[in-house]
Amino acid sequence: MSMTPTNLPIIPKIRKNAILTLLSKGTRIDERGFEDHRNISFRTGLIPNANGSAYLELGETKVLVGVKIEIGSPFPDTPEEGNLIVNAEFLPLASPVFEPGPPDERAVELARVIDRSLRDGRAIDLSKLVIIPGRKVWNLFIDIYIVDYDGNVVDASSLATLLALMTAGVPKVSVDQSTGEISYSKKEFEPLPIQRRVVTSTIAKITDENTGARYYLSDPSLEEEMISDTLVTIAYSEDGRIVGMQKNGIQSIHQDDIGRIITQARRLSERYFTRLKELLEVAGKEERGSISTSQ
């Protein structure tokens, strides 16, 4: 269990000014363009006891996701669907400012953003996780661990979750119609019923207080997050539909810039999808099992 801080460390003023000076010249502290994301690398199948898992690096931000599937009872309001449960934890080793303790509101928020993007985007056909309608279903647990924190944990978690789900298998199950007894295989699996791929795209708004210039940066690093006014995360399905939106930070967004943020976030999601597809093709397979590749 972990506790995440409400406030991030304060960035030195000289460093902030250096970042703003570079932004005024059209580049970033790590030499990326405003719409570029950081390098992506990942491995899957690292947790032998999980039904699916993925370890992903987005720059220096590192995330591990495990998927566990167990038999349970349906929620009262969705008797004809399996259950989706998402948890997130910021490990103390991920950052000097993280301390042991129960998950705080930031971890809860991360889990909720991932949960809603999958649920509202209908990424998984939960109706196919029903074993006995109204009585027994598959519980799908997604556990997200922030291993190293260098900004934009939402997109890193979203990408790692998608990969873990893509490699997850549901045990083959059978039901004795006379007794209602359920049995399932520990060696035979069926693909998780993924019907739509979903990723989040995060844009940071940074305002230069001296000049009034506003900058919008895709996939912000930790330093960029630390000087940002606000962060906007938009979840997109692979067909370009918006399926979720989240804003962090107390600063407002100019009305004229909303459309620009949506467009920039959509382009970032397209880059994420394209890059994942390229890396998966390099790995040579896009099915349950172990995949290891890097940019």
Image (tube, rainbow, N blue to C red):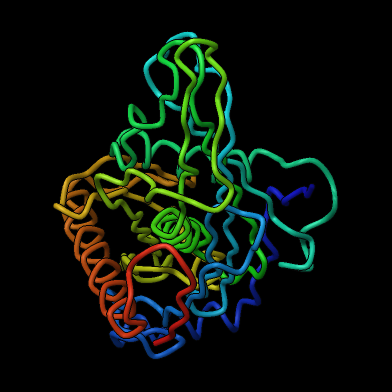
Q: Position of residue 231 (x, y in %)?
A: 42, 54
Q: Position of residue 107 (x, y in %)?
A: 63, 45
The residue located at (55%, 67%) in the rendering is 45
The residue located at (26%, 62%) in the rendering is 269
Q: Is residue 29 above or below residue 90?
A: below
Q: Is residue 146 above or below residue 131?
A: below
Q: Is residue 86 above or below residue 190?
A: above
Q: Position of residue 124 (x, y in %)?
A: 34, 40
Relative horizontal placement of residue 98, taking residue 242 as reference (left or right) = right
Marker count (numbered):
0
Relative horizontal placement of residue 126, taking residue 53 as reference (left or right) = left
Res 287 → quadrant: bottom left
Q: Nearer the viewer, residue 121 or 165?
A: 165
Res 82 → quadrant: top left
Q: Residue furthest right?
A: 100
Q: Nearer the viewer, residue 119 or 150?
A: 119
Relative horizontal placement of residue 238, taking residue 98 as reference (left or right) = left
Q: Can I make out residue 250 in this image?
A: no
Q: Position of residue 24 (x, y in %)?
A: 32, 82
Res 23 → quadrant: bottom left
For the C terminus, the image quarter is bottom left
Q: Residue furthest front?
A: 178
Q: Can I make out residue 112 in this image?
A: yes
Q: Is residue 184 above or below residue 187?
A: above
The residue located at (69%, 55%) in the rendering is 90
The residue located at (70%, 64%) in the rendering is 9
Q: Nearer the viewer, residue 58 or 248?
A: 58
